Amino acid sequence: MDIARLSGVSQPVVSKVLHGGANNVRVGVATRERIIRIAAEQGYRTNLAAKAMRTGRFGAVTLVMSTTRSRSILPMELLDSIMNALAQKDMHLILARFPDEELVNEGFLPRMLSSWMSDGLLINYNAQIPQKMVELIERHKIPSVWLNSKQSHDAIFPDDVQGGRLATEHLIGLGHRRIAFLNYTGWDHSSAEDRYQGYMEAMKAARLEPLLWKTMGLPPRSEVSYSCRKLQEQGCPTAVVGYVDNEPWYVLEACRQLGIRVPEELSILGFNDRELFHHGQEISTMIVPEKEIGEMAVETLIQRIERGPLESASRGIPYRNTLKASTIGNCRD
């Protein structure tokens, strides 16, 4: 082959560099870079079909999502992390959206890997998951990793109990004693219960009385008026922890209407995959570790593909970042 001759190396060395052949051959960095440069100059392109026949792998992973957007929320940080992690393994990502009736079809799901020329599945289906879909994946031992879903195995998700506890401890450390947990969004996803559990653990450890604000059962679009009412009650909180991004926005709008200064009179903290803002006001944010989730999910799926049917332990990824823009030491007690 011209690439071997022009590079001054043997064919097995070229095979090792370009498509992972001759695994017993060691290649230095300078030699590897020279082979890749010469291959590009010669217009070389990997024959993916031949590689798949030789290795039994397609070099691709499918990201499975629901056609119902609210069931498959996909933060850009998570998507970027998955794609970068796969690129480092010389693999690529296939995005696929399916209605429930296909994902619970006895014939469709088992054939998905061959139909989509994929080695495994990353399942970004994190709310109202069809039980039969889970059963089919289990029964056919499809190499899969769940994203942001607390399955018994093969799942990577944020440690939301730790996140809720860390957020509340941050406010307690600033001197706050009246701290409310806000959930205006609902309890459909495990993160709601887990963040609330973490909040309760921190409040109990500090011997503080918990306060739960929730709008379940109230008329639609009543979140701001509800927040106004709660903020005007006797003994209202000096700080709030919002379950997701919605709650801090509603409370901040209520503060604007009531003339309550943030963060001087009320500290607000929320959860999101990036910093929260409302009308130019930055809100303290517990950053969901999407980057780490993506990296760990890819690593876990590749291990699962290589191991075969052996399951992987599920793992909660800890939170690290708290932005302190709208939290301040308690000035009212």
Image: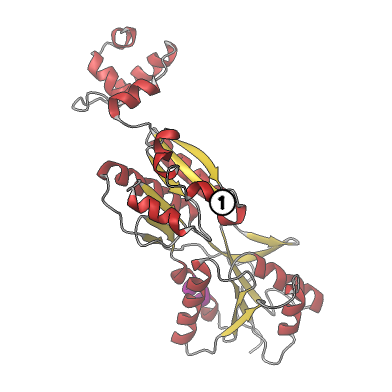
User: In terms of depth relative to the viewer, which is nearer, 12 or 309?
Assistant: 309
Q: Residue at x 47, y 40 (%)?
A: 83
Q: Is residue 201 above or below residue 42?
A: below
Residue 328 visible? The answer is no
Helix, strand or loop status at disc 1 = loop
Task: Specify few, some or many for label 1: CA neighbours under 10 Å numbering under 14, 14-19, or 20 or more.
Answer: some
Say if the magenta span includes residue 2: no
Q: Quadrant of residue 92?
A: top left
Expressed as whole percent of the image width and height from the top left, the position of residue 81 reads 47, 45
Residue flagged by tag 1: what amino acid is it? Pro
Q: Quadrant of the C terminus?
A: bottom right
Q: Quadrant of residue 180?
A: bottom right
Q: Quadrant of residue 90?
A: top left
Q: Is residue 236 left or right of residue 3?
A: right
State whether the magenta stretch is mostly helix, strand or loop: helix
User: In terms of depth relative to the viewer, which is nearer, 108 or 36?
Assistant: 108
Q: Is residue 60 above or below residue 319?
A: above
Q: Residue at x 47, y 67 (%)?
A: 160
Expressed as whole percent of the image width and height from the top left, the position of residue 39 reads 39, 15
Expressed as whole percent of the image width and height from the top left, the position of residue 122 reads 44, 47
Q: Quadrant of the N terminus?
A: top left
Q: Is residue 324 left or right of residue 16?
A: right
User: In terms of depth relative to the viewer, which is nearer, 297 or 266?
Assistant: 297
Residue numbers of the magenta segment: 164-170
Image mark count: 1
Q: Is residue 281 above or below residue 140?
A: below
Expressed as whole percent of the image width and height from the top left, the position of residue 241 reads 59, 74
Dot 1 corresponds to which residue? 75
